[in-house]
Structures are given as structure tokens and as C-alpha cells.
Amino acid sequence: MLKLKAAQMLGWVIEKLRIAWIGTVILIVLGTLGSIYPLTLFYGVQLMFGSAAALVALRLHGGIYGFITVTAISGLHLLYTGPTSHSLYMICAHFIELIWMLGWQIRWKNGSIMKANAVFWVVMLLPVLGYGHFILNVNLDDVKYAYMHIAVISMVNALIAGLVVDFWITNGESQSKRTGTIPLSRIAFKYVVVFVVVVSLFLLSADSRRQLNQINENIVFNLEHASNAVIQDLDERYLTIQNMQQSMVRYHHLLDVNVIILDIHNRVIASGLDSLQIGEYLNTGNYRYLREGQSSIIFRPGDAYYSDALTYWKHASFIYKADMSSGLPYSVFVETSSANYYPRIESIYLTTLQSLFLIFVTSMVVAAPLSKKVVSPLIRLTRMTGLLPRLLFRNGKMDWPTSHVTEVQILIGNLRKMADVLLEQFEQIRQDKLTLEDRVRARTKELKNSEEIKRAIIDSSIDAIIAVDSNGLIIEFNPEAERMFGLKREEVILETDAPSLFQGASCMEIKKMLERFEYIQGKRHANVEEISGIRRDGSVFPIEYKIVEIQLGNNEKLYNLFIKDITDKTRAEEERVRHALALERLNTELFNEKIAIQEQRDISEHFIESVREGLVMSDRSGTITIVNRRIEKMFGLGNFLGRSIEEFAQAIDQVVLTDDFNLVEQTKAFLHGERSFVETEFIFNNMEKSVFSLYIKQVDVPGKNHGFLLVFRDRTEEERLNRMKNELISVVSHELRTPVATIMGYVELMMMYDLPASQRQEFMETISSEGSRLSSLLDDVLDIQRLDNDGMTYHMTYVPLLELIEGVAEQWNIKSVQRIYVHAFNGDFFAYADQNRMVQVLHNLVGNAVKYSPGTDRIDITLWEEDEWICIDVRDYGIGIPENVQDMLFTKFYRVDNSDHRQIGGTGLGLYISRKIVEDHHGTLTFLSASDKGSTFKIRLPKQEDLL
């Protein structure tokens, strides 16, 4: 009952909505709500659904109702939000759009709303951009943003309007007044566009929100960071009432923010803003005020609509109040302008809206041929079914379904015709089947009554056929049986004392065998083998036969025997068995030999593939018979198995840098028998310039067509180790010679001359310094050995990095020309590390910075914390590191070429040792550098959240 009342109520509502003025009023209400409460895609970009209602009214009720709808919605929206220049532009654009849509509907009746709207905005693109930029002198990006925003809103409204109109046509209109069916091509086109646009709206909106949230987080983070720095300076008395105003410039320069300090009465003591004077009261209403615990600076409702979003971002300022936990009699505010982030924000807005605009237009362009492609098979099917012949009507009716889709409706009608034809054909086939069954029965009766046919079959059988009745009398004995047993038919037919025909099984025994089987279609049978037949002369021969017991009427039975003489078959079977046994023995021997050969071949292949050398073997004709995978890994030339050795030689020659190396000529000499052995070397043209040795040897095996073998051996690592050994000897001997020579020189002077005590003390200090230098060199060499052999021992404890860095800086400040400055932000800076090893790393980095920055006056060491890392940066302003050698900086014994500067000593081990130590502490050591601008070495150590 409730369902019936609900259906009646729904029918009444639909009936009222069919009245034009009632439907228009409903559309005005819904459109006004959609304009006043828009859907926000992302900050400042909102979809307003007012024009969708106007397009629905235009399509369902006509142009007058469409213009009434857009006028009413625009007026109500202006009353609610107030008139603005942009609102007037919007209203003007919607009126022009509606005029275009009306003209489109007059030209193409029931045309697609989506296509009409898309064409309008594509056509208006260039005129509007040109008018706004060149006539009104508005920035091109602002014009593009405003246009794209209005266009995207209108296209979404057109999409919604198209769906609403289609839904109303198929569900809301009465059958008598329906405007028409909907082509399937339009349905396919529309829903392809809907899918693409909806997915794109979600994805692009989500991406834009994500990017703007990142900017939001950056602004809040920078403000918090700047406020913490100011509070720290106040706590540590670096910032006093005397230098506050001067420090404002420094904060603005270093932190890119404006700092405002107030007294307890909220009067300005110091300000980085030119617009805020000392002694003035701070009015936070002029800014977006970020209170403690508040991290969001996104739009609030009513902040900005349409193109006002970019203006808002360009002029908005944000002010943050610092947490004064130390109890100082000041209030600290930090101010920044979002204009600093405006280029990136503008790019996000423009890119998103342009992408949506292009997706709308492109999806329609692509969906049109796609929908035709999908629908074309149905169109062809309707044409084919329309060619079916029309026949007479049948009695009765079938309840065929109806459809609002044009092509499907046509298809249903044609299938109805085809069903009528198929039913009539089925009736005709059934009649023909009855006639055919009558003919088959008549023909079967004729065959059963044809004794001549039966006799011809029995007489022509190649098997002996004997029929016995239930009393044991032979009633049939065909000619083949006569020949086989040497008896005449008349001698055995109906004779109770017929001669015995079998040896080994009597007819009675065979009938007993049949009792174990069931009747199948009135008969049962048994096969009997390995019995003997008896001829007239008493000779015995092997036979096999099949006995079939047939159940006749009146409980009568008939036994048919089908007999074969298997004398020849028996002999052939015996011979086949003998041959099979011999063949089995031979197969066993061949199988064993095959297994042995396969094992030998597997061993050979495993040996060939396991060697580290590349192997290639060629036969006398120049065809490659063996090539292992090592060749492919060495040269990357592909598989040459079965190809010519000359092709392989040409491929090798093309990737060799050695001038006098010619593998093609050498292989030709081996093919012509002119050489039996060659050994040579060449350099491979790859990134490492690998060095290979090659020897070619003639291979002669008796009775085999083997030719010669090429063996390639990669000697790159050996050459590298030799170079490292020579470099180690060179560097260590040079570095050892200098301090040893100095020590020996001063010792000889002290032994030869009676020097004053002050000079002897100076010599002794020099000898001690050189001895320390020599000890440090030996320690580096030992550290290299321990690091390479994983023998380095660390004594881990919690190290105060700030004190450690300041101690290293103080030592270098005593003996270096440059001043070492240490900068530290908030943090405890405790690392779980080996203190001595970390001092060694810092001395290496600071020493390099001092050596490679001649002529400069400072080196900066910065210490701060990130989420998971403690960060140390050592920056110099010296000669820098050329880009082409930066990849080799952390290798052993490598030193930057300083030929253009004063000679700088060193072994090239410091950075290698430093990186290994930092990595053993689960950290990283990297650098940034540019020639003639200096270098920054970055240490990242894992932060320990809790001290053990």
C-alpha cells in the first residue's frame, strides 16, 4: 500500500514538473542555491551551477524560460553577494553564452548541449584574450585565469545540463509528448566525456590542493623557524633593546621575514615593517593572524571568489605570534607576505584551469569518433536485420520490450520480424521431420525383409561366420567357414552330430562365459582367444573368435560366431616379440650412451660458462661453433653462435681503441693456416676503457673439423690495482720523504753546530711537528687498511657535537690564516658516535677547506637538526672542485688538480677515510661545489631521539 502511494505521489510530482512555469521556478531555486553555495575545487576556485539550470530550462521549455532563469538567478546572486565588476562580467558572459546556445538549438534541433557549449568557449578564447590584454591593458595571465575559470564552470554546467535533459527525456516526459529518442552514439559520447572530465576534476583538484598545502606548510614553517631564532637571540641576550632596530634589517635579510617586537602594552619597540612605526599600536586585523596552535592559512569562506583568488594571494600578509615561554617582557610577531610565493601559486591556478579546459575540449574531440566506432556495429546490424523478409502474422502476441535508444528500438523491431520467420520455419522443419521418420521406418522394414542382402553380406565376409540356435544346431555356415574348416555347409547345417570344430573350448563352455555379461540393446558378446580349430583332416590351427548372443522374441536366443584364422598373425607376433626384445636391448645401450654423452657435454658446457674468460671457437670454414655468455657480458654484441667469425671480428674491431689491433686480419690468417698462435692486448671503447688480453690458438682434433680458439681476458681490474699500487708507492714515498728529509736536515744542523738554546728549541719543535705529520700519514695508511678489511674499531658514546666542533675550530683558528666561524641553531646536537673518529673527520674537512681556499678570510661551519638527521655543513670560499672530477673526489689517493695555484700537499686519503667513517656511523658525507666559488661538505648523522 505504501509503495502504491509513493508511486502515485511520484507520478503527481512528475506531472507538475511537466508544466513549464513550475519547472522553471524549481530550476531558478536550484540554480540560485548552486551559485550562492558553490562547490570548491581548491582554494579560491569554485564551481557555480547557476548556468546549468538556465541551459536545462532553455532545452526543455524554450528560449524565453531560459532567459528568465538566467536573469532571475543572476539578480538573486547579486542581491546576496553584492555587485562587483567581475560579477557583471560573469552575467554578461552567461547571457552571451545563452544566446549562442539558443541559436545552436534553432540550427540543430535537439543538438548536443555539451558540443554547443564547448564550441562557444573555444571560439571566444582568442577574442576575449585579445580584448582583455590589448584593449583593457590587463595582464595576460589574469585574463587567461578569469577566462579559463568561467569557461570551466560553464562546461561543467553544460555537462550537468546534458545529463539532466537526457534523464528527463527518458523518464520524465509522457510517451505521447516525448520529443524523440536518443541516439546511442550521443549516449556513448556523453558518458565517455563525463568519465574523463569527472576523473580529471578529482585528480587535478587533488593535485592543486596538495601543492597549495605544501606552500601553506612552507609559510608556517618559515614563520615558526624565524620566531624561534628571534626567541633564542632574546634568551641568549644577543638581542637587546639597544640593537633591536638594527637587528630587524638582519632578520629580514637572513630569514626573509619582518619581525615586530612589542612591549607589554602592545606598543612597537622595533619593527622590520616600514609601515609600522616605533611606539605605534599593532593592529593585527590588517593581517591574517596565525595564533598559537593554528597552522592553516588557506582561504576562509568569503575570502575570495573567481579571479580574486590571485589578487588575494598577491596582497595577503600573514602574521605569527611567537611563543614567549621564557617570561621576557616582550611580544614577538613575525610577518611575511604571500607575494613571495605568488609565481608558484599563479602557475598552479593557471595550469590546473588550462588543463581542465583542454581536457574538456580534447575529450569531446576524441569521444566523437570513439562513440561512432562503438555504435557502428549496431547500426550495421539494424541494416542487416531490416532486410529479413516479412511473412504472415501468427496467432497470438509476444510481449516485446521497448527502448528509448533509437538504434536499439530499430533492432528490436527487426528481431521481432526475424523471430516470426524463424518460428514458421521451425514449424515447417517439424513437419518435414515427421515425414522423414515415416520414410525411415518404411525403409528399415524393407531391409529386414531382404534375405538377399543378408546372404550377400554373410557370403562376402572375410571372417568365418557360424550361427547356432539355442538347441546347439548350426543354422548358418558361410563360405569362409567352409574354406577354413574344409567342411561343406550341408555337412553341418541342422546336424545334431556335426563334427567338432574347436579344441580347448566347447560351445557350451562359451555360452556359460556369456552369462557373466548383461544384454545391451538385446545382445551380449565375449571374445575368445588362444584356442585351436580342427579341420576335416584333423589338423589343428590357432583361431580367435567373437561370440555374440542375441535375445530374440519368445525367450529364444541366437549365437553368432565370428572366427579368424590367426596362424599368420601368431607367427608375426612371435617374430615381433623377438624383434622387440632385440630392439629393447639396443635402445637400452643407446640410452646409456646418450646419457654418458649428455653428461660429458653438460660438463663441457658448465666448464665453458664458468670460466671468467670469454671463449669463441671457429671451425675451418669460419663458422662459430662455441661461444660462451661471458663474451656477451664483456662486449654486449649479442649471440654470434652459428655466425661467421669474420662478422664477430669486424664487430670487435669497431669497439677497439688500439690502433694496431686488427682481429679481422688475424682470423683470416688462421683460416688460411698461416698462423697457429697469437697473443695480444687491446683497449675496449667503453666508459672504463677496459684493457683485454687475447690469445688465439689453433685446435686440431683427429677426425673433427675444429679450427681455432679465441680467449678474451679482462685485465682492467689488474691494471687498476697496478696503478693504485704504483700511486700508493709514489704518494707515500713522496709524503714520507718530505718530513724525513726535514727531520734529518735539522738533526744534522744540531749535530754539526753549537746552536743557541732558543734556536735548538725551534728546531726541536719543527722536528716534533714533522714527526707528528709523519705519524698522521702512517695512521691514514693504517686506517685505509682497517677500513678496507672491516677492521676499524669504534668506541661509541653520546658526543656533544657543538662542543666538539668549537674545539676543532679553535685549534684551526690558532694556526690558519682563515677564521673558522661556527653557527648553530636550536637543538641538543648529541650524536651516538666515536668522538675521536668524528674529530678526525672534522679535522680532515676543515684542513681541506683551509688548504683549498687560499686568499680567503673565513670558513663557515653550520650545525642544525632536521626530522631524522643532525646536519653539519663545512663551507669554504676557495678554488672549488671542477665538475668533471667530482665523481672521483672520494676515491683513494685522488687530489684535485691545483696546477694553477700554489702547490698543495696531501695524500688524497682524507676524504676517502672520512666518508667511510661517516657511513660506518650510518650517516652520509656529500658535497656541493663550483669552480672558483668554493665548496660545501655536508655531514648527515642519524638523530637519537632518546639517550640510552
Image (spheres, grey):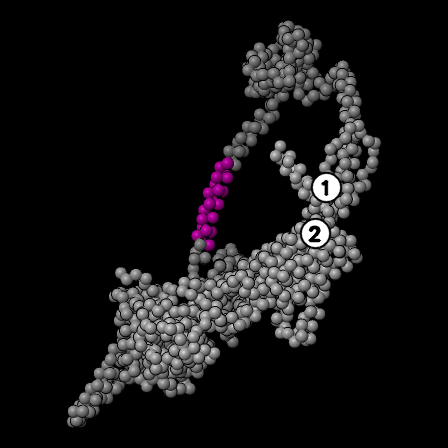
Can you identify the residue that label 1 sits on? 403
Q: Where is residue 525 in the image (x, y as percent from the top left)?
A: 60, 18
Q: What stretch is highlighted in magenta?
A: 584-605
Q: Which residue shows up at 57% across the image and 25% down it?
A: 570
The quarter of the picture where residue 855 lies is bottom left
By secondary structure, the bulk of the magenta-drawn segment is best described as helix
Report whether 850 appears left or right of 7. left
Q: What residue type is labelled 2?
A: Thr
Residue 113 in picture, x, y percent from top left: 71, 55
- Mark 2: few, some, or many residues within 10 Å (few <14, many ≥20)? many
Q: Residue furthest top?
A: 496
Residue 429 higher or lower than 141, as above or below:
above
Nearer-the-camera pick, 46 or 438: 46
Most foreground residue, 510 or 443: 443
The answer, for residue 37, to whether it is visible in the render is: yes
Compared to 309, does 875 lie above or below? below
